[in-house]
């Protein structure tokens, strides 16, 4: 922790253990944390099916619409992990700072769906969520066709019109985007993205951290 950051924490009455940041803590991080604590409130009703979407940019909107389509979860709000969206609300729901994660879980939020532009950040945030007693969960659009024999990992996203066939395996934190299809007995690794309209044939194995482009075919 830098000396200037420590001085600022002392001024604001923030103790080190409060800071959600791992690694080096800077003055800028302290300022952001203090601003989030003083400006954002969680005075909303939390339900047993409340969900926070930990995701920035346009994909947050895609996930939100998928959640609405299934009508099983109640979206409590969003977390802007970049700090750059500059939005206070999205779809009329609050957009929280990344520093509000611990407070949201203390409030009683049971479920999170995490998507960031960094695999390491996604891992770290998801582990933190689990350590604090909440769960990361998978989301599927109601128009997705998913075989009951699929072995689905944690925090998977299945977009509108996606098809996942018999006896497939979908790894943790993988995204099957709109209109993508995965045929029978195929294995997809962790942290993959199957882009819109791509087709994966049966008995194919795709490793971890793979990106399959728009309308691609793998057989």
Image (spheres, rainbow, N blue to C red):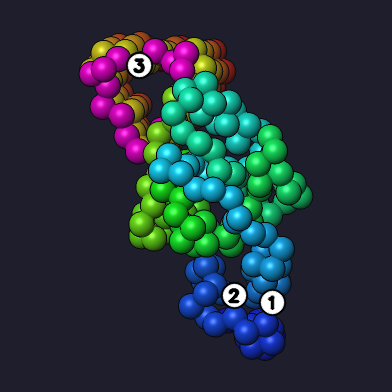
Identity of the residue drawn at 32% across and 34% down: 153
In front: mark 3 or mark 2? 3
CA gap, disc 3 and disc 1: 47 Å
Mark 2 secondary-structure assignment: loop
Which comes sooner in the sequence, label 3 or label 1?
Answer: 1
The CA distance from mark 2 to mark 1 is 7 Å
Pinpoint residue 98: horizontal percent, then vertical percent: 59, 57
Is the residue marked by circle 1 packed among few (<14), some (14-19), or many (20+) residues within 10 Å? Answer: some
Magenta stretch: give its range: 142-156
Task: Give left or right: position of 176 versus 27.
Answer: left
Instruction: Name which of mark 3 and mark 2 comes first in the sequence.
Output: 2
The numbered dot on residue 25 is: 2
Quadrant of the rendered structure where residue 157 is? top left
- What residue do we see at 61% from left, 55% from top? 43
Residue 176 lies left or right of residue 213; in this view the side is: left
Cβ–Cβ under 8 Å for marks 3 and 2: no
Residue at position x 44%, y 25% in the image: 140
Residue neighbourhood size for the residue with mark 2, other residues' Cα within 10 Å, grouped as few (<14), some (14–19), many (≥20): some
| Residue 56 visible within the image | yes
Residue 76: x %, y % from top left: 55, 43
Looking at the magenta stretch, what is its main secondary structure?
loop
Residue that carries the numbered disc 1 in the rendered image: 27
Q: Nearer the viewer, residue 14 or 29?
A: 14
Residue at image mark 3: 146
């Amino acid at each position: 922790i830098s000396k200037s950051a420590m001085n600022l924490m002392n001024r604001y009455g923030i103790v080190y253990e409060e800071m959600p940041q791992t690694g080096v803590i800077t003055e800028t991080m302290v300022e952001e944390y203090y601003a989030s604590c003083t400006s954002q409130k969680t005075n909303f009703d939390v339900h047993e099916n409340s969900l926070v979407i930990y995701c920035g940019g346009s994909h947050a909107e895609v996930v939100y619409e998928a959640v609405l389509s299934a009508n099983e979860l109640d979206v409590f709000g969003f977390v802007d992990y970049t700090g750059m969206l500059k939005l206070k609300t999205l779809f009329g729901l609050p957009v929280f700072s990344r520093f509000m994660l611990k407070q949201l879980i203390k409030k009683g939020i049971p479920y999170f769906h995490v998507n960031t532009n960094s695999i390491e950040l996604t891992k770290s945030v998801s582990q933190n969520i689990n350590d604090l007693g909440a769960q990361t969960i998978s989301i599927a659009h109601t128009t997705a066709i998913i075989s009951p024999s699929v072995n689905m990992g944690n925090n998977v996203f299945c977009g509108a019109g996606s098809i996942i066939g018999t006896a497939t395996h979908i790894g943790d934190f993988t995204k099957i985007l709109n209109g993508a299809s995965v045929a029978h007995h195929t294995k997809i690794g962790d942290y993959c993205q199957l882009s819109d309209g791509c087709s994966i044939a049966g008995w194919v194995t795709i490793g971890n951290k793979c990106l399959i482009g728009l309308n691609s075919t793998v057989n």
